[in-house]
Amino acid sequence: MNKIKILYLIIFLFSNVQIICAFVNSDSTSLLYSFKFQKAIDTTEVKSKINKEVKVEQLEDVFLSLSLSKSLKRNIPEQIEVLDYKKLNERFSFNSADILSSTPGIKVQKSQFGGGSPVIRGMEANRILLMVDGVRMNNAIYRKGHLQNSITISPSQLDRVEVVYGPSSVIYDSDAMGGVIHYYTRKIKVNSALNTFKHKVISGYSSVNNSKTISFNYEYNLKKIGLMGNFSFSKFEDLKMGENRKHGYYNWGKVYKYSDNSYTFYNDKPLKNSNNNLQKNTGYSQKDFIQKIFIPIGSKRDLTLNFQYSSASNIPRFDKLSETKGDGSLKFALWNYGQQDRVLVSAKWEVQKPTNWIETSRTILAYQNLKESRENRKFGDESLNINKEEVDVFSFNSDFSTKLWFNTKLDFGVQLIHNEVSSEARKDILNIEGNNIIGVLYSEEIETRYPSKGSSYSSVSSYGSLRSKINNNSTLNIGLRATMINLKSKWKDDTFSYKESIDLNNKALTFSLGYTYMPKEDLVLKAILSSGFRAPNIDDIGKVREKNGILTVPNSKLKPEHIYNAEFSIIKKSKDRKTNFGVNAYFSVLNNYIGKHYYDVETKTVVPDDYKGEMPSYIYDGELMTTIANVNRGKSYTTGFTAFFDVNIINEVYLKGDITYTEGLDIDYRTPLSSIPPIFGKLDLAYKLRFSENIFSVKYNGSKTLEYYNVVEGIDNHNQLPIVNGEYQKLPSWITYNFYSNFEINKDINLKFSVENIADLHYKEFASGISSPGLNLSVSIGFSF
């Protein structure tokens, strides 16, 4: 594997070095001169020339993620949402997952503060496709429960975020069942008239967790090359929950005891928490770096080199550190996600009119390396369990766009992806003297999280998407995608798998048919029929994982799950364009959907639904645990709607709101689906003053009773509900009041101020293992120079 990785990088770097050298040699003197730091000359003549060359795009009117060429939003039948640079900077966000929490139709789950798992239409994790700069982030070990990978992109690096709801686009491969979240980092360009140099430093502070963030951004727009870079660092301390317990549950979520154990300090007893509203062991730090190089080669060819690096410190798993044993005492002395690193290197080659019949082409060659680990130790145990995983992802995308005839465009392309996964695990027997851990006496092998002898996951796919403007009122969209996937895994023995190695092949053909109709200028009607699929990945078929005394074991007999979707949208505007109302409703059926069920490790079989005896169990890490596995459950459905409105009340005063309802049910077994949030929404009053833009925001979340939770899978964390007299109560509804203000002191200085959860309300987001932040005052200041 290392040889393959090295070879790939050599080819990648060598090819790019050749291009850069050829470019530099063409005019090395002027290039070297352009790097001299000089102040841009502000003259009317130069400004005029720049304005003629740079076309200003109205980003709110175009969408980038569904076509190689830009598409007008009104011509797109899919439900979409765009967070442009202005919207991204309206509010202070701890990470890129928090940005999504204010987006209509998206809910964000957290198991610990260093996380954020977006939920779209009752689907999350490996049923949501994450993209960054045209590169697929989903890999072979994206799990079904909750994922925290969206935090690995710093908010300060983003230019825009686009969301596609549902499985309605054939441009995207497996996993895009609930939708697509596409992060676009800052754009760069060249300036043929004048070398410009821009720098910006942003520093922020939040009171609720004593967090400090700082980022440095630079952008050099030279005559023949553009450079953009960003470095950001964030440090978060323990998070305070709200103290206003309007729900009436006095003890719910409070932290009475906590562990002060570390990798060098040993204490076999938890400590008493002096402040029960302070969630101990929730702090962490993160650093992110990005470097982009833009090189135009002639007037029709552009090369963009992209390097991204993200690294998070140990992130305490708060819900595990709050887990108790049968006697009520804390179970874990230490439970961390170890240092997690993400590296992305990509080269994007774009050509205008490469042939007479192709208008645009884009090719992206990318490599990603991801490292993650899990480390835990129980109270009274003198050993530390360590699981480490590493994933190498190689990808190649080539997309083309051509005009077939008048007002008809065809997008088509191919994609190749290869994942290599390694997994190792050990138990370190610690050398302890008093309260000090001075080393490791010896180590022994334990069960790995994924197949111990390695795994691979590869896919090859192609697509075609036709968009035709039939007349001034109608647009038709037709798409088709074919995908083939191969998965290979090897175990050291057949303890969990029915054989020591597997080789699975899956294929799928998905489609999309969309129609947009504008009977009037102020009315848009949209309808879609579409399908999608998700092939089982290595996490689905090969994972060993314990949670709350239940052990998830491998099942390598899984089949792909397919989704069939129908949706309808209506958007109505007033004649004066000051009022805008819309609603999107959908109904989706999942066939062979993957869910968890009781599983017998000895016989490698699924327990029958009518079985009345003792459920299967297995001794794992010294405990007898009930065993479950991922299985194909049959058919299920999800349905719901998102409605929104915005009204321009007077001049610069706007009222905006949205509400989302989701429902999901296992049709065959009449049981609730996981990841179905209660009804939620928000109402914003935005107004602009001379030097500031202000938003007063009200967020609402409904309640949910235990009967609507899937208690077998455990994904919804029903054990986090309030308990009264030994019985789980409903998840309380909540309303928070928030204020955000953005001051433009002058063209170079920007000040943001916010007050969130003004009432200091205590609440928990649905399926989250941590209480949400209490009253929070945030301030950030940015300097441009």
Image (tube, helix red, strand yellow):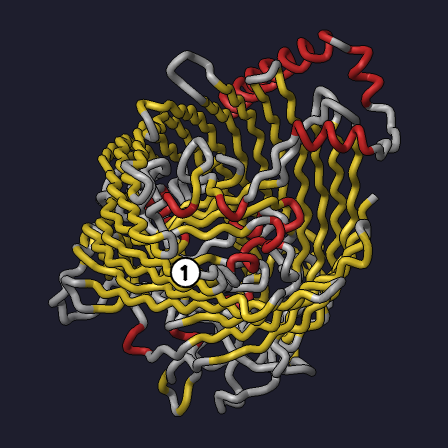
Q: Is residue 493 above or below residue 737?
A: above
Q: Is residue 164 left or right of residue 389?
A: left
In the rendered structure, the answer to whether residue 464 lies left or right of residue 580 reads left
Q: Give the quarter of the figure containing the C terminus.
A: top right
Circle 1: element type: strand
Q: Name the residue under label 1.
A: 573
Write down the quadrant of residue 490 in the picture: top left
Q: Where is residue 701 in the image (x, y as percent from the top left)?
A: 44, 75
Which of these two is toward me, 575 or 199?
575
| Residue situated in front as seen by the camera: 319 or 400 | 400
Q: Quick check: can you spot residue 427?
A: no
Examine the rendered structure and indicate whether residue 565 appears above or below residue 751.
Answer: above
**Residue 97 drawn at (x, y percent):** 54, 56
Q: Which residue lies furthest to the front in this view?
A: 575
Q: Where is residue 478 in the image (x, y as percent from the top left)?
A: 26, 36
The residue sitting at 22% across, 57% down in the picture is 600
One can see residue 577 in this view: yes
Residue, x 74% and y 22% (percent of image)?
A: 223
Which one is in front, 629 or 208? 208
Picture coordinates of residue 771, whole percent (x, y): 54, 74
